[in-house]
Amino acid sequence: MQSERNANFNRNYNDYICSVAPKTKEARTLLRAFFVGGTICCIGQFIRFALEYWAGLSGTELAAYVSMIMIFLGAFLTGIGVYDRIGKYAGGGSIVPITGFANSVVSPAMEFKSEGFVYGTASKMFVIAGPIIVFGVASSVLVGLIYYVYFLVI
């Protein structure tokens, strides 16, 4: 009896939520994300080709310069307020790893700059990106230890 009453309540609640919640336009959202994410990647590839052709860079040096330029562009566009508009338009497509990471570091730093350099900008800079860095470093240490133990034993 109680479980039947709960099932009716859940069904009624779900029906109410579906009637009140705004409908999403999934196809449009996915197309925008795909287009913007692909455009960001194409810009990175263009920078790679340009540095390869005009500067004669190759290998890890080329990869480092492309990464630095993409990080700079993401941070700069965040600083002047353009990246937020791109994010509103593209949704998840703007979270392409390198520019999205730069955006997640710069946004909190700008938001808390009124609190001063140390307690505002410097301390809040890694509010969003901090857990990514911590878990990335911790997992790389763990994997390194596993490889070390594995190859030490063999």
Image: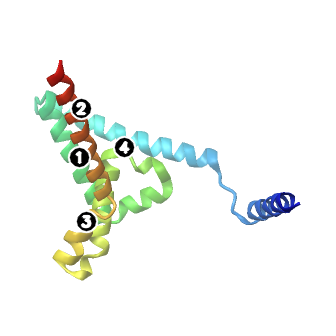
Mark on residue 146?
Answer: 2
Front residue (pair 63, 4): 4
* Secondary structure state at the residue bearing disc 4: helix
In the image, residue 55 sits, relative to residue 17, either above or below, namely: above
Which residue is the extreme one toward the top? 154
Q: CA distance from mark 1 to mark 4?
A: 26 Å
Front residue (pair 30, 109): 109
Of the numbered discs 4 and 3, the one sitting upstream in the chain is: 4
Query: Residue 88: x, y in percent?
Result: 48, 59
Q: CA distance from mark 2 to mark 4?
A: 36 Å
Q: What crowding class fits label 4: few (fewer than 14 Cα within 10 Å), some (14-19), or many (20 or more)?
A: some
Q: What crowding class fits label 3: few (fewer than 14 Cα within 10 Å), some (14-19), or many (20 or more)?
A: many
User: For the residue marked with disc 2, what is the amino acid?
Assistant: Ile
Q: CA distance from mark 1 to mark 3?
A: 18 Å
Residue at the image point whose x is 69% and y is 57% from the top: 23
Query: Residue 50: x, y in percent?
Result: 20, 34
Q: CA distance from mark 2 to mark 1?
A: 14 Å
Labels in figure, total = 4
Of the numbered discs 2 and 1, the one sitting upstream in the chain is: 1
Query: Residue 68: x, y in percent?
Result: 18, 46
Residue at the image point whose x is 27% and y is 62% from the top: 126
* Secondary structure state at the residue bearing disc 3: loop
User: For the residue marked with disc 1, what is the amino acid?
Assistant: Val
Which residue in the protein does label 1 denote?
137
Mark on residue 40?
Answer: 4
Which residue in the protein does label 3 denote?
125
Residue at the image point whose x is 31% and y is 50% from the top: 99
Mark on residue 122?
Answer: none
* Secondary structure state at the residue bearing disc 2: helix
Of the numbered discs 1 and 4, the one sitting upstream in the chain is: 4
Q: Is residue 77 visible?
A: no
Q: CA distance from mark 4 to mark 3?
A: 23 Å
